[in-house]
Each structure stands twice: as structure tokens, then as C-alpha cells.
Image: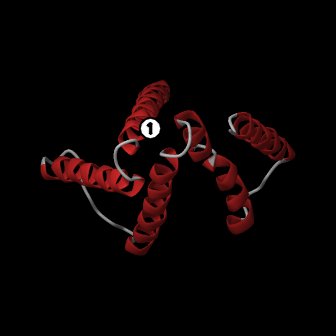
């Protein structure tokens, strides 16, 4: 039993490290996108991101490092459409906002996830979570209005 717990702990530690690396890469991407948006339209910056992302996935799939298999193609198509729309809007907005504010607003999605999972999936929403959502929303509003020009 201890070997299983140790293995799960190692996987969790590795996964946490990967998420920290992903956050770092997203932060670098935001700064690069802001710089690119100073010279190109936001939609063109988003298109380049899509092309580079698709090329990266194609190389990884061709090398056998990842396996591509769609179990629910309609859900995948919906997720891609909604995610692509979100990325497009993010890159258009980042050309008009400070990069920190744009990234904060983009990363406020957990507020909506909590509310939508309660509304549409029937997941429980505790008073503690609701309180945290209100405090977090207030923080987002203060940052946005504090940076308004």
C-alpha cells in the first residue's frame, strides 16, 4: 500500500511541477503576445499561436510522443471552437489593455467555471466557495478599475 501511495505522490509532485511550468509559459506567452500585438492585429497574433500550436502537436504525434484519439469528437469540436474564440478575443483585447490586466481577466475563468458547474451540472456550491467567489470577484473589479485610464 505504501508503494502505491508513494507512486501517487510522485505523480502528483510531477504534475504540480508541470502546471507551474505551464503557468510560466503562459506568462511568457502573454508578454510576447503584447509585444506582437503592438505590430500586428490581435487576430493575426492568435492565428500564429494556433499555427504554432498545431505544428507542435503534429510533430509530437508524428514522433510518437503523444497519441491523438478523439473519444467524443463533438465535445472536442465544441471545446476547440469555444477555446479558439476565447484565445482570439484574448489576443484582440491584449492589444488594448495592460498585459497584467488582460491576463488577470483571462484567468478569472474559474469564477465562471464554479458558477456554470453549479447551474448546468448541478455540482454543489458551498457557502465557503460562494464567499470566495465574491471576494475574488471584488478583487478582479478593484484591479480592473484601479488600472482604468
Q: Quick check: 18 left or right of 53?
A: right
Q: At which x and y percent is residue 145?
A: 74, 39
Q: In the rendered image, which quarter is residue 121 located in?
A: bottom right
Q: Quick check: 23 left or right of 71?
A: right
Total marks in image: 1
Q: Residue at x 35, y 41 (%)?
A: 36
Q: In the rendered image, which quarter is residue 34 located in?
A: top left
Q: Residue at x 71, y 35 (%)?
A: 143
Q: At which x and y percent is residue 71?
A: 36, 68
Q: Quick check: 50 left or right of 120?
A: left
Q: Quick check: 90 left or right of 104?
A: left
Give the secondary structure at mark 1. helix
User: Is 97 located above or below residue 75 in the figure?
Assistant: above
Front-most of residues 124 and 74:
74
Q: How is the image coloured?
A: secondary structure
Q: Residues within 10 Å of mark 1 (few under 14, many from 20)?
A: some
Q: Residue at x 44, y 57 (%)?
A: 88
Q: At which x and y percent is residue 144?
A: 70, 40
Q: In the rendered image, which quarter is residue 136 located in?
A: top right
Q: Quadrant of the C terminus?
A: top right
Front-most of residues 91 and 108:
91
Q: Residue furthest left?
A: 63
According to the image, label 1 marks what residue? 30
Q: At which x and y percent is residue 48?
A: 29, 51
Q: Residue furthest bottom?
A: 74
Amino acid at each position: 500500500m505504501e508503494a502505491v501511495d508513494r507512486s501517487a505522490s510522485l505523480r502528483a509532485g510531477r504534475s504540480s511541477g508541470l502546471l507551474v511550468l505551464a503557468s510560466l509559459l503562459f506568462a511568457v506567452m502573454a508578454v510576447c503576445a503584447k509585444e506582437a500585438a503592438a505590430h500586428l492585429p490581435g487576430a493575426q497574433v492568435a492565428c500564429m499561436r494556433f499555427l504554432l500550436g498545431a505544428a507542435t502537436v503534429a510533430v509530437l504525434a508524428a514522433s510518437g510522443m503523444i497519441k491523438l484519439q478523439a473519444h467524443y469528437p463533438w465535445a472536442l469540436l465544441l471545446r476547440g471552437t469555444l477555446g479558439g474564440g476565447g484565445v482570439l478575443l484574448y489576443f484582440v483585447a491584449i492589444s488594448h489593455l495592460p498585459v497584467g490586466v488582460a491576463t488577470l481577466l483571462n484567468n478569472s475563468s474559474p469564477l465562471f467555471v464554479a458558477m456554470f458547474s453549479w447551474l448546468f451540472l448541478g455540482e454543489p456550491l458551498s457557502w465557503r466557495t460562494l464567499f470566495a467567489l465574491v471576494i475574488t470577484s471584488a478583487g478582479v473589479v478593484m484591479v480592473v478599475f484601479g488600472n482604468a485610464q
